[in-house]
Image: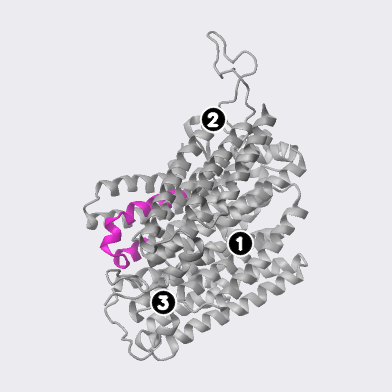
Amino acid sequence: MSWVLVAPVVLPLLTTAALFLLRERLEAQRVVSTTSAALGLVAAIVLLGRVSDGGIQVVQFGNWSAPFGISFVADHLSAIMVVISGVMATAVAVYALRDLDPARERLGYHPVFHVLLAGINGAFLTGDLFNLYVWFEVLLISSFVLLTLGNRREQLEGGVKYVAVNLVSSLIFLAATGLVYGTTGTLNMADLAVKLPQADPALVVTLSMLFLVAFGIKAAVFPLFFWLPASYHTPPVAVSAIFAGMLTKVGVYALIRAFTLLFVGDVALTHTILLWVAGLTMLTGVLGAAAQSEFRKILSFHIISQIGYMILGLALYTPLGLLGSVFYLVHHIVVKGNLFLVAGLARATGGSFELAKLGGLYRHRPLLAVLFVVPAFSLAGFPPLSGFWAKLVVVRAGLEAREWGFVAVALVVGLLTIYSMTKIWQAAFWTPAPEGTTLRDDVPRLLYAPVIALALLTLVIGFWSGPFVALAQAAATELLNPAAYVGAVLGPEAAAQLGGTP
Amino acid sequence: MEVVLALVVGVIIAGALYLVMQRNLLRFVFGLILLSGGVNLLLFTAGRPIRGAPPLVPYGLSEPAGAVANALPQALILTAIVIGFGLTAFALVLLLRAYERLGTLSTDELTARVAEPRPIADRGDGEVAP
């Protein structure tokens, strides 16, 4: 049994237990929480190294062989996602040390945060459809708690919408899982990849649409995204940053997994639907952002538009398109999480999230302005930052697939993203502060640390994109060759049934 | 048997959807409870129920004699019931809190109530505390 493969899930769960025992000792909780997040990152990097060297890693729980027990599988995509979740967890855990009020910490922020991490990593690593549902619920219920922790009116109002929509989505997912089981008699994803092509094609397409809706709600794609801008701006920054970075991306991951491994029988139909979903998601997200005037609401709408790009890469279903999707995921999580943290710094300095009440941050804190410009321009796709390469790959994949219309949408959305970012830049950083506001100097230095680290990571992905592209390419190659995944989980005979090379 | 169960699932889910689309949030939660019951029954039906054949291996044999009921869907349902219970409990407490703080459970009024001025005791995170 490979401990490296289960460490990203077991470590946060053990940490949660430890943190509950340290209930009354906040100082100790902070130390344990940060250390555990950093250890989780190390474990994830070790896992990625193993996957790069030794191919797809598999653990069969309780030594029940594959279709009968629950499998954990780490291919390149899973390992990359676990690493990036480790990066975000560490950054947010450090940020939370100074951002959160003791009241929220006493209510249990730290333990719940680690349950969330366990849920996220479990969803990335599991190779079983029902187990995926369970991990979704784990991350969902902890996100409910984090979102409403503190009981402010806005939080409750946003929380009601978030909880309601996500509960319905979970039930759709559960129903779809039950129907898949009824159709094929199995829930192991590798086994499903073998058995779904033998089922009635019409039934499989219907099931795939149920999953599209269930995962689409989690990933906040058009037209199922309304819960996201209604809730992401309400909790403390340390919570909304991890939400913005990771949660919708779990939905995107699930979509990628489902539409490369399970539902590839009728690509002409399903992936054309995905293509339209992607285009409309990009467009509505960016137009929604243009109408907003609150720092975090603008960023929330941009999450939606950026998810469109990832789905676009998946919908093209070419090696380059999937490479683009995976690279975009990594770039986006780092950049978007960082922008939320910058929004927190801007509020700590300028006193508000409302652009109308902000101003003068560039003169007051040039460093903060630089830290905003790096992720903001990366999000908009300025060369040579990470977002430029991500957009370049997706757009090029679109051109090769001759989807001119969707390429045009992607480019226009990029331009409109620049508009939103310059709007924030002008209102919060460039123009003088409005009358009567004082810019504060007592912002804790520690809050800058994760922001600087993530900005540096953005620069590294931009300037030395080679290794990152190579990893994304390895992930894309595996995604387009499900036989490798099936072979690793079920053995070479099953892979041969799929007609590919294990 | 399966046809009857399938019809029952359909009726339950139809009723649940009616409740879920109501403007009163308490009814919405009732709809959710009903919906999760319907989905659990769907899982059960999808597992092909067989009457009166427990999945037990007789003494001395290595596999059950004849067709037996499938135990896996029941394990799945058990998991789903536990998860559903937790989520429902959370949703109800959330509604209670929302009602206490915002004074309404109507989806139309909820958003309007947030914009009202806050009580002084509320520290708030939208602005930095003085």
Q: Label 2 neighbourhood size at 10 Å, few (<14), some (14-19), many (20+)?
A: some
Three-letter residue code for mark 2: Gln
Q: Label 3 neighbourhood size at 10 Å, few (<14), some (14-19), many (20+)?
A: many
Q: CA distance from mark 1 to mark 3?
A: 25 Å
Residue at 40% x, 69% y is A453
Q: CA distance from mark 2 to mark 3?
A: 49 Å
Look at the image and give the residue range highlighted in magenta.
Answer: A93-119
Identify the element where label 1 is drawn: loop
The numbered mark 1 sits on a residue in which chain? A
The numbered mark 3 sits on a residue in which chain? A
* Callout 1 touching callout 3 (CB < 8 Å): no
Which label was assigned to residue B74?
2
Residue topped by disc 1: A221
A99 w.r.t. A169: above or below: below
Question: Same subunit under labels 2 and 3?
Answer: no
Query: Quick check: is A153 in the magenta stretch?
Result: no
Three-letter residue code for mark 3: Phe
* Mark earlier in primary sequence (1, 3): 1
Residue topped by disc 3: A353
* Callout 2 touching callout 3 (CB < 8 Å): no
